[in-house]
Image (cartoon, grey):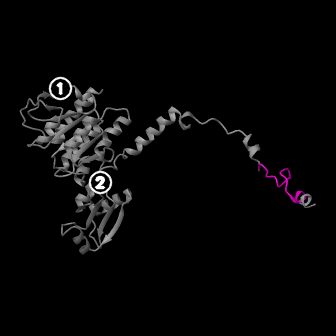
Amino acid sequence: MAGNSQRRNRRTSNKKGAQVGSGGKRRRGLEGKGPTPPASARKGHVKNRVANAKAKHSAKRPAPRRGGAKGTAELVVGRNPVVEALREGVPATTLYVQQFIDSDERVREALQLAADLGLNLMEAPRPELDRMTNGLNHQGLVAQIPPYDYAHPEDLAAAAFDEGEDPLIVALDGVTDPRNLGAVVRSVSAFGGHGVVVPERRAAGMTAGAWKTSAGTAARTPVARATNMTRALEAYQKAGLTVVGLAADGELELQDVEALDGPVVIVVGSEGKGLSRLVGETCDVRVRIPMPGGAESLNAGVAAGVVLWEAARRRG
């Protein structure tokens, strides 16, 4: 009897318990998954790997005009300089006007230009403007220019290659006059160049004077700052650009240089001193501009313009 009781109370393996449903998974599994994604979106496909590689390359390269050193803020002081700067499109952010200023035609024009450009207008007492300008004769008008956002030298060539064009770049070696820099920027823009490179130290930067001389072209022609000009030129050479230096004793005349119709960097030295030794040694070729009139040298703006014209002519 004990044995029969144990058999009656023992669970058997075929006793039914609670059954778990599919929860609709089987039905959903039969539904379609939509259209087949393009090859570039399918993981493992060769086009997907190519797209990922391009995206990774773009992420590594800094965006144009964001990879270089920052400039410093600047003040334009005085009625005539302020009006001229605003007329030429110098990128001011704020116009300071002295309280109770004696208005004349220049003050009225400055206020109108500031309003048209959407600048901040700040009224300030004379002592405050004296402090801001370190006692300069501001005549009641001061315009504030923000720091220029320099590009990285590599961005200039990269942007040209991205557009399917051969880079045409001008590098300035030891040019200290901002007006010469502005003139070069204007010539680069006029002849289809891709930018200008300047050294970070002992050289002209994008000041209000350079902006004015560029006649507005600085807004669309990037300027890059190189920590070391020699290394920047070597990097251009590795990227496939020919470095052409302008020198009074160059081994070739301008018309004999074949490299101008390809990817090229034109290096212009300062008037009088010319190219520095290291930069001159880095150049692939040194070129002289024929001057039948007998002038000893040309300033940087004129020399760059002559070579850029020749390069543009050959590129058609």
Q: In which quarter of the image is residue 263?
A: top left
Q: Distance between the residues labelled 1 and 2?
A: 36 Å
The percent position of residue 238, horizontal first and vertical second, equals 27, 35
Q: Mark 1 points at which residue?
A: 255
Q: Give the range drawn in magenta.
A: 6-22
| Residue drawn at 67 percent across, 38 percent down | 34
Mark found first going from the N terminus, 1 or 2: 2
Residue drawn at the location 85% of the way across and 50% of the way down: 14
Q: Is residue 148 visible?
A: yes
Residue that lies at the very extreme toward the right in this rendered image: 1
Could you tell me which residue is drawn at 65 percent across and 36 percent down?
35
Near mark 2 (Cα within 10 A), the count class, few <14, some 14-19 or many ≥20, is some
Up-down relation of residue 215 to residue 118 (above or below)? above
- Could you say which disc has been placed on residue 215 in the image? none
238 drawn magenta: no
Label drawn at residue 148: 2
Residue 237 in picture, x, y percent from top left: 24, 35
Q: How crowded is mark 1: few (under 14 residues within 10 Å), some or many (20 or more)?
A: some
20 part of magenta stretch: yes
Taking depth in this image into account, of 285 and 192 the one nearest to the observer is: 285
- Measured as percent of width and height from the top left, residue 165 is found at 34, 32
Q: Which of 132 and 150 is in front in this view?
A: 150
Disc 2 marks a residue whose amino acid type is Tyr
Which quadrant: the N terminus?
Answer: bottom right
